[in-house]
Amino acid sequence: MAKLEIIKIGHPRLAQKAEPIASITQEIVELARDMVETMQAAPGIGLAAPQVDRGIRLITVDLSAGEKKDELFILINPEIKEESGKSLAEEGCLSVPGIYEKVVRPELVIVKGYDLDGREVTIEARDLLARAFAHEIDHLEGRLFIDRLSPLKKNLIKKRLRKEEEKGLKG
Ligand code: NI
């Protein structure tokens, strides 16, 4: 297992649509394990393959951040089949460090995908778990959580990130 580098906002991969996985090779299985390790080390509650610079439809979600084995989801080609309700809560992203904003997400989602053995799985997720799946599946579409904010707010955040980057270069 190996920890992977998490790419940050501004990297073109984060704005690209990821490709479906056609077959679950050993490489995919190893990537999934490395993503789990990377997510837990961050620590974060979710990670999508584009965040480690792989343009494929693979996500990991774990609300317990490695504390409970049965809360870990590794999903291949995940899709939101149904959604209902709305919830507004603060969100962040490992690829957008230091930024936390309130984002509207569905209260409930039904997610379908495949596990690493190629078995179809259906998950009914509510609240924070629904939010985590929606956030990670957005990454597969090349969408960051700040893309769901108003254009004004998004521009303010981009300005702030640029300023921080300039400071970093000087310091
Ligand atoms: Ni994210």
Image: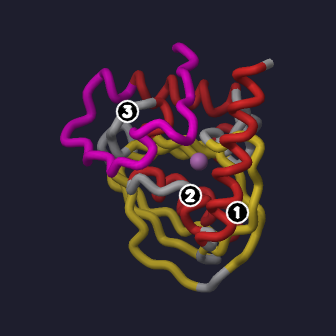
Residue 17, given in percent of the width and then of the height, sits at 33, 51
For the residues labelled 3 and 2, the Cα–Cα distance comes to 17 Å
For the residues labelled 2 and 1, the Cα–Cα distance comes to 10 Å
Task: Give the residue at mark 2.
Answer: 135
Circle 1 residues within 10 Å: few <14, some 14–19, many ≥20: some
N-terminal label among 3 and 1: 3
| 155 and 99: which is toward the camera | 155
Q: Does the magenta stretch include residue 10?
A: yes
Q: What stretch is highlighted in magenta?
A: 1-29
Task: Give the residue at mark 3.
Answer: 54
Residue 61, given in percent of the width and then of the height, sits at 58, 46
Depth check, mark 3 against mark 1: the one in front is 3
Q: Is residue 81 shown above or below 59?
A: below
Badge 1 amino acid: Leu
Q: Main secondary structure of the magenta part?
A: loop
- Quadrant including the C terminus: top right
- Tell which residue pokes out farthest to the right in this image: 171
